[in-house]
Amino acid sequence: MHHNYDLILKGGRVIDPAARLDGIRDLAIKAGRIVAIETHLDPSLATEVIDVRQQLVIPGMIDPHAHIFRFITGVLGMDADWVGVQSGVTTLVEQGGVSAATLPGFVEYVVKAKANRVHAFLAPYAAGGVGGFSYPDQFTPGTIDIEATLKAFEAHPKVAKGMKFWAEQASLLKFGDASIRKVRTIVDEVQVPMYVHMGELWRLPAEVHAQFPAERVMETILPFMRPGDVFAHAYTDRLGGFFNADGSVRSLVRQAIASGIHIDLGYGAATNFNLVRQGLEQDFLPQTLGADIHAYNTAIKDPHIDTGGRGRFNGHPGVAAGMNLLMAFGVPLEQVIPMATCNPARIFLREQDGVGTLAIGAAADITVLDDLRGRWRLTDTANDEVITERLVHPSFCIKNGQYHAANSTLLSLPEEVE
Ligand SMILES: [Zn+2]
């Protein structure tokens, strides 16, 4: 018998913020494309039907802050499909592990080899994240090769989508704005965004803090940022973040947001619940949910990588975890779905085929989430906690029409409470 469709996802709550769609629908896929979204599609027209009643059907989730150059970037490099399709995430943006020098290797051994859709924001420094960002001496302007980086963007425009930068006291003290100046030159030339890590990266000696206080980092960096660039780690409790000591959002951050600079969650060990609370009271919210999963940001370790026992995060990493975090503090589901879908597509990838939307004709990248009710305890590294009564949890995803079960061991549920 002839089938019109390869697959129908039947009866789910289909939410596509880009199309302002939110309702119970059947969604049909053929030849890797979304071909119909209707209130009723005849199941006999499909080769396969998956019952998704009581589940959420959203555009394939996008993680704009991934570390997936496995075996190259030390304890930070995770298997792309592990943090990706096996965790319900169809698109990953590697942040800063890949440099112009290592991009060809990344394309060959990650982009082409893995099921996920994979992009990268390049490290400016020649070594990229080799060895896991453990060597501050690699972060020197002398290793930023503008010509080589421009060539890398030209050679791999579909993979290289922006530049990573670490706003970091020690190098600012030593070299002033020499590094960020070079990065600005590159991103202006290629017309791509810059993603800037905020918060102390390494424990620095007291004399560095005395000579270059953490508060000065943003003052120094901001003149080099433009609308469309992104600050990472919204609620970091490391020095040099987004808050004043009294918990108010820094006025420079307000100015940055007003000028069109975006904020990414960059959820991890440094994410502080008290800052989440205070930030939300002041309407300080991320637009995207970078998961930043690496050995320090998950208790689940890659058995093939020796982490030396490091890692202190007791949270539950992932893009869905970012949604759960914000929902636990009162942000509605309808507001967090765009942060995982159309927002990162627009901000990091400049909208492209099939990413961040369920548009008819687009490549079929779809995430299906369980929408759970109960009582769970979320905790941060400071052992602060919040009880939440709703969790979204990846069930499966479709990437380019291909089914992937969300069976990653990273996807544990938080502790259930009475
Ligand atoms: Zn990171």
Image: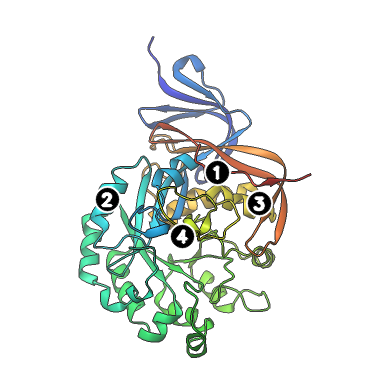
Residue 220 image position (x, y, % from top left) = 44, 82
Q: What is the secondary structure assignment of the residue under circle 4?
A: loop
Q: Earlier in the sequence, mark 3 or mark 4?
A: 4
Residue corresponding to mark 1? 411
Residue type indicated by callout 1: Leu
- CA gap between label 3 and label 4 equals 34 Å
Name the mark nearer the viewer: 2 or 1.
Answer: 1
Residue corresponding to mark 4? 308
Q: Earlier in the sequence, mark 2 or mark 1?
A: 2
Residue corresponding to mark 3? 327
Residue type indicated by callout 3: Met
Q: What is the secondary structure assignment of the residue under circle 2?
A: helix
Residue 319 image position (x, y, % from top left) = 53, 50
Name the mark nearer the viewer: 3 or 1.
Answer: 1
Q: Residue furthest top?
A: 1
- CA gap between label 4 and label 2 equals 28 Å
Q: Earlier in the sequence, mark 4 or mark 2?
A: 2
Label 1 crowd bin: few (<14), some (14–19), many (20+), radius 10 Å: many
Label 2 crowd bin: few (<14), some (14–19), many (20+), radius 10 Å: some
Q: Earlier in the sequence, mark 3 or mark 1?
A: 3
Q: Is residue 88 visible?
A: no
Name the mark nearer the viewer: 3 or 2.
Answer: 2
